[in-house]
Amino acid sequence: MSALVGTGSLVRLALRRDRVLLPAWLAVFVLMAAGSAGATVGIYPTAASRAQAAASINDTPSLVALYGLVYDPTSLGAVALIKMIAFGAALVAVLSVVVVVRHTRAEEEAGRLELVGATVVGRHAPLAAALLVAVAANVVLGLVTAASLVAAGLPAPSSAAFGLAWAGVGIAFAAVAAVAAQVTESGRAAIGTACAVLGAAYVLRAIGDTSAASGSGPGWLSWLSPVGWGQQVRPYAGDRWWVLLLPAGFAAVLTAAAYALVLRRDHGGGLLPDRPGRPTTAPSLRGPLALAWRLQRGSLLGWTAGFVLLGVVFGNVASGVGRLVTSPQAREMISRLGGEHALTDAFMATELGFVGVLAAAFGVQAALRLRTEETALRAEPLLATPVRRLAWAGSHLTVALAGTAVLLAGAGLGAGLAHAAGTHDAGQVGRVLLGALVHAPAAWVVTGVVVAAFGLAPRLVVAGWVALVAFLLLGVLGPVFRLDQWAMDLSPFTHVPRLPGGELSATPLVCLVLVAAALVVVGLAGFRRRDIG
């Protein structure tokens, strides 16, 4: 039997399972790129204003580290998409990692792949199907993104280069995920390993770009990073098509390695097996909350470190954000609003809003652990003991809700300390920290959606991700497309006070907490009455 027999059937199965996930995320990426291009025309209408903005970006190390270099200061596309090329490519890479692991290691861990393998399916077919779906999704993303940028008025060849740069980075990390799925024994470990490689690649790119911007240091480090390869295509600044061969070759080598590793391990195992547990239960595991913390602490600690780092970057950028506004009309408006201090507050409030959405993503992930434990058949034997259903579900819910607040506090503290250091004003720490924490109730509402779905219709727990994507689209693209206020109000993040700089109102926050509590109560009541599994 051929090692690839059954690949077509598995591809169709994967596409059916991802019929909501993939279109939703593709829509997010495409609309974000097109919206960024459309908004930049009004902010930087002339070549001179774009050149000044590009110079401000290239002269700010924290901005270069976060987004990269503007290679053509007069190009509308280069300035418009500076936030999208590297940071967006990293998000595309995360999507690729999730898709590949979801259809390989996660299926194997859940035991479903063993059932599939008992039919006429080759040993390499599951991996081949996952990679084909990931590659196809990235190619479609690249082409549709290019078409949307052309529709926004940008040059077609450069738009194609931008879309293919995104696709190249995504395909490269699909191959990274394929290798990680062979090395580890769990889906979470595979995603964590691949995302760690992505983080290292982003750091390499950041070090290389900041070194190149300063004219000293190892600028060549960017060429060691798959994320850096996406930037080095330089869309709208020369369109270096040959660079696309680098992620293609990288993906080909790692894909071949993944296929070789499949044959060197047992089904269900990994090349690096998990360490055996203790022969007796540790005192710290005497309870459902302690177990939930043990299961999710690694994820929470990793997210916390990332949020603190992101907050520090935003705090550094905020100190010099006034230099990025070059339009006389914009400066006049800012002057009426209170000068550059008001602009700094507006920038910080906007970035903290983005942090709030990211924190909600952790809440969704942590709450979904309930469904993961149930489908993996680990919840049923646990609930056969004196552990009550509500205590078990509440333990994971506590980690999700408290963890969300911890992430926001970490980002707010990091941003506040960095901003205070840049402005020599210690009072900024408290203002920025509060601006981050006010997003917790909105993030809890999204977690509540997951809990409600888990209790009432567990097969629909993906509704949490769908809701989060919808709220993200409303927040990012609603103002661009001038949606009616009633549509904007559908997102809980719309009701969060814009801090720092705005007025703190307790009423919307209390209402959001009540909505989140109602969703949680409904979900827990449903879980208490339904069958396990």
Image (cartoon, rainbow, N blue to C red):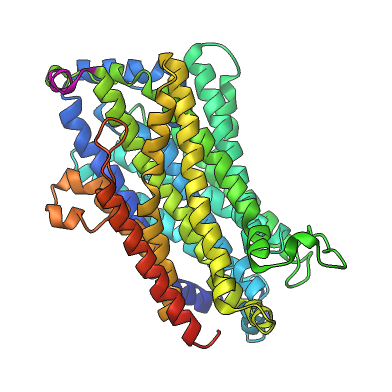
Residue 17: percent from left, percent from top:
45, 74
Vertical order, 530 against 3 (above or below): below
Estimate the x, y position of residue 161 in percent, counting from the top left. Answer: 36, 39
Q: Residue at left 26%, top 51%?
A: 508
Residue 464: tell me if it is visible. Answer: yes
Front residue of this view, candidates 61 and 353: 353
Q: Is residue 476 above or below residue 76?
A: below
Q: Going by the image, does 37 lie left or right of 359?
A: left
Main SS, magenta region, reads helix
On the picture, is 437 further left or further right than 148?
right
Placement of 285 over or under 439, stated as above or below? below
Q: Residue at x 60, y 46 (%)?
A: 302
Kindly give the residue lying farthest to the right in the view shown: 279
**The quarter of the displayed image where residue 491 is located:** bottom left
Tell me where residue 431 sits by quadrant.
Answer: top left
Q: Position of residue 291 (x, y in %)?
A: 68, 64
Query: Is 121 placed left or right of 272 in the picture?
Result: left
Please name whichever residue, 44 or 441, is drawn nearer the observer in this view of the structure.
441
Instruction: Please identify the quadrant where the N terminus is shown.
Output: bottom right
Q: Nearer the viewer, residue 212 or 32?
A: 32
Queried whether the magenta region covers residue 382, the answer comes back as no
Locate the C terminus and report the quarter of the image it occupies: bottom right
450 vs 437, nearest the viewer:
437
- Residue 131 visible in the snapshot: no
Q: Position of residue 346 (x, y in %)?
A: 27, 30
* Residue located at (39% from left, 37% from top): 434
Residue at 45% of width from left, 30% of height from top? 415
Residue 203: image quadrant is top right
Q: Is residue 154 above or below residue 259?
A: above
- Magenta stretch: give its range: 332-339
